[in-house]
Amino acid sequence: MQQDVIEGVPARHWHRLEDGRIQCDVCPRYCRLHDGQRGLCFVRARKGDELLLTTWGRSSGFCVDPIEKKPLNHFLPGTPVLSFGTAGCNLTCKFCQNWDISKARAFDRLQDLASPEAIARAAARSGCRSVAYTYNDPVIFLEYATDVAQACRARGIQNVAVSAGYMCAEPRAEFYRHMDAANIDLKGFTEGFYKKLCAGALQPVLDTLVYLRHETGVWLEVTTLLIPGHNDDPAEITALSAWFMEHLGPDVPLHFTAFHPDYKMTDVPRTPAKTLIEARRIAQGHGLRHVYTGNVHDEPGQSTWCHACGTRLIGRDWYEITAWAISEGGLCEQCGTPCPGVFEPRPGAWGGRRAALRVGGELPV
């Protein structure tokens, strides 16, 4: 049997226990490791008397996506975002739609080597307004993500986190100091769902949402993948919407997206469009102003509307922008009501394209 060789850069957010083990404090899983052991995420590992991040500078690939694919509908609409991830994850979602990356246990998945400066240069060269840490959860490669984020900010490029929000308070504060926008996956609204399907817990995710909304300037949007028979009950969506309105307010965009059979849940059917439309209606009924449907063709449910006068502010057909009625300053052209978000006078023109990108860059020795 081949021996596991652990190499990497020193990780942060850990401490030594009295029994000699090292505890990782990045997420509420609190993995306690003997020498040579890896955490559940697989990429944070103990070697000797320190914890290492084994994927610094290594990516599963780079793509230029529309920002709406993250999904972010109120952050630089129409612009391209350079997207990348590494391997591993700190949740074990049975419905994972990126399972070939997030569940990877072999580093042959990590084809691209890239320094933070190389990524920032590639983003600038390709015309990307932002870089997204996505595909797997950036929580587990925090040290690499924050290094990249600093290189991007030095070039005026913004940073986007796509995360499940399952992390502890201290690393959360460090990580989001470097982010400009985030989409957090609120995977369900019961502890039972998180325990059974994700081997996690709901409350830390709610804590992250409240933290981002009230203690940072990070632009926040939230996504819930509705899975038939698991988290699509109208009573659960009602409870989610009521909590959302009370704790996050009416202006944080909420996306309900359709599940497709994947990973360990291939026996579950696709989410019907009518389920998403009804979820949107419920959330709007609780006062949420910007509720979207995703992974289905639904122009009304994917467009942005002025909550004051009903004008279509941004028309969308999948990832294509078909209408624009936002004036400079993010105001409705019809009535002057502000639309919450980060907008420029005109939208980008990237459209629905997805382009693979080769990012080269020598890694520091």
Image (spheres, rainbow, N blue to C red):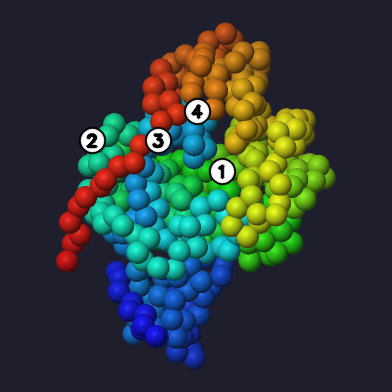
- The amino acid at mark 2 is Arg
Q: CA distance from mark 1 to mark 4?
A: 26 Å
Q: Nearer the viewer, mark 4 or mark 3?
A: 3
At x 34%, y 56%, the residue is: 59
In the structure shown, which secondary structural element does the residue marked by tag 1 occupy? helix
Given residues 250 and 157, the one toward you in this image is 157
Foreground residue, 313 or 61?
61
Quarter of the rendering containing residue 113: bottom left
| Of the image marks 1 and 4, the number of the one nearer the N terminus | 1
Label 1 sits on what residue type?
Arg
Q: Three-letter amino acid code at disc 3? A: Arg
C-alpha span from label 1 to label 2:
32 Å
Location of mark 2 (residue): 125
Q: Which structural element holds mark 2? A: helix
Q: Nearer the viewer, mark 1 or mark 3?
A: 3
Pointer 4 residue = 319
**In which quadrant of the rendered image does the N terminus lie?**
bottom left
Picture quarter with the C terminus: bottom left
